[in-house]
Amino acid sequence: MDEIRHVRLFRNGRNQAVRIPVEFELPGDEALMRRDGDRLVIEPLAKRGLSALLASLEPLDEAFPEIVDPPPASERDL
């Protein structure tokens, strides 16, 4: 099962808060929170868009094969 850590709840103005220990830190500066029965689930907010997806991909370590793809014949050649 996942690692468990005892934390304390405190008040920050009118909001209840919890300090997230360093080993549980989430990436980014936004998250989604939802209630699942008596549990609160906090998930990192996924970055959106093609740029974020491409930035998350690892480069390929292999070369692409050469593909023979001649241009189509012109109408004059037909």
Image (cartoon, rainbow, N blue to C red):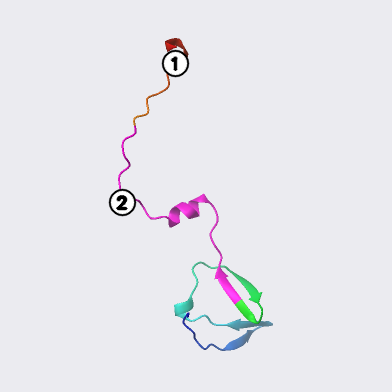
Task: Tell me if 35 is positioned left or right of 6 in this view.
Answer: right
Rendered-image quadrant of the C terminus: top left
Which element carries disc 2, helix, strand or loop?
A: loop
Please report the bounds of the magenta region as a residue range: 41-67
The quadrant where residue 77 appears: top left
- The percent position of residue 50, horizontal first and vertical second, equals 51, 50
Pointer 2: residues within 10 angstroms few (<14), some, or many (20+)?
few
Q: Tell me where residue 31 appears, x and y as whole percent.
A: 57, 69
The residue under label 1 is 74
Number of other residues with Cα within 10 Å of mark 1, as a class: few under 14, some 14 to 19, many 20 or more = few
Residue 68, position as x, y percentages in the image:
34, 30
Q: Please tell me in which quadrant of the rendered image residue 19 appears.
A: bottom right
Q: Is residue 45 magenta?
A: yes
Residue at mark 1 to residue at mark 2: CA–CA distance: 38 Å
The residue under label 2 is 61
Q: Residue at x 43, y 21 (%)?
A: 72
Q: Residue type at mark 1?
A: Ser
Q: Secondary structure at mark 1?
A: loop
On the picture, is 49 further left or further right than 72? right
